[in-house]
Amino acid sequence: MTGVLVGLLLLAPPEDAERLSSRALAAAQAGRPDEAEALWKQALAAAPGHFPSLFNYGFLLFNGQRFQEAEALLARAAKANPKDFNTRFILGSTLLKLLRREDALVQWRAALALQPSNIRLMQVMSVEYTAGRYFNEACALGQRAVKIKGDAPEPWLIAIKACQDAQNPAAFTLAEQAAAKFPQSARAVFEYAFHLQRAGRREEALPLLEKAIKLDPSYEEPLFFSGDLLLLEDRHEDAAERLRAALRIRPDYVPACVSLAKALMALERYQEAVSELEACAKASPSHPQPHLLLSQVFFRLGDEARSRAEKEISFRLRRENPALMEAPQARPFPAVTTARR
């Protein structure tokens, strides 16, 4: 009898991939990842194209930060089910972890085609487009997001910044519309003031900067830009007060520090200017601008040796950190991304 039972067990069909995958998912949800991985490996040995096993096993590896292995499984899952949004999204996130931004964006583009109104994905893509200097794509995507979800300020602000980086005139229009739509948002009001200032419309910009400061006194940018405008109007004391306030919020804010030093130099308070610039250089040790202005202050004070030394430091830092002094230029997104093996 025992021999017959053993024979029947040997003839029993192996467990199918669907059942193995279900058991693996239960194990993963119960906090037993090693068991889940073993079961998914069995499922894929039985059915190499089984989508739930490919996706869920890949997602397990992604959560375990085993990105190289996760990418291989998720790529197979995307091939097995090209219309699954989550697969494309997680595959893109995996590729980004592997420092393959362009490949990640290709997958996210495919995901967005499946869910064209997914604002969360648009925001993620906009950030990565900008990081890769694909400013035109970020601008277009930002404007698309505004049309879908224009009832909140965040998509507007992302779109304004993206179009500004792309040097697209849509940035001004978006900023004007956002300020009108969200008059109690300090950031929206500031963005419009910033673009008015860039357009040379200073008289219109200053009241809006004042409004942004009242709406959010802890927001340093309106303080800096209003201080900078006051500096241009030779209102040096008022400018210094605003710029100091900006630096109290953000001590490494180099443009505010430089403008403050210029205001203090105009007031012939050179030692104060030196103190502010030295503090700024300490807070931002790689930035050449504080040292360049220190060179000018020491020259005014008649200390030519220190003036030359600061100028040399400034030139050295500029060579070492050219991006700090140059506006990044847009580049086209690759038409075709070659898959890496």
Image (spheres, grey):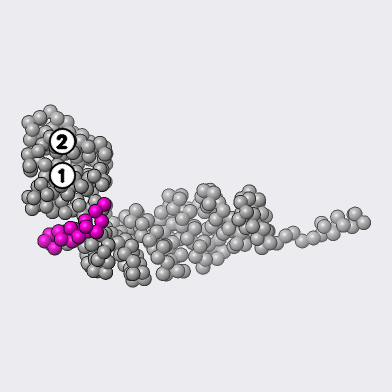
Q: Is residue 203 magenta?
A: yes
| Closer-to-camera residue (131/195) | 195
Residue 324 placement (x, y as % from top left): 25, 45
Q: Which residue is farthest right?
A: 1
Residue 285 placement (x, y as % from top left): 26, 37
How packed mark 1 is, by other alpha carbons closer than 10 Å (few <14, some 14-19, many 20 or more), is many
- Residue type marked 2: Val
The quadrant of the picture occupied by the N terminus is bottom right
- Residue 124 as seen in the image, left or right of residue 290: right
Q: Which residues are magenta?
A: 201-218
Local SS, label 1: helix
What is the tally of numbered marks visible in this picture? 2
Mark 2 = which residue?
Answer: 274
Local SS, label 2: helix
Please determine whether, in this image, residue 219 is positioned above or below residue 87.
Answer: above
Q: Is residue 211 visible?
A: yes
Q: Residue at x 20, y 47 (%)?
A: 245
Mark 1 = which residue?
Answer: 260
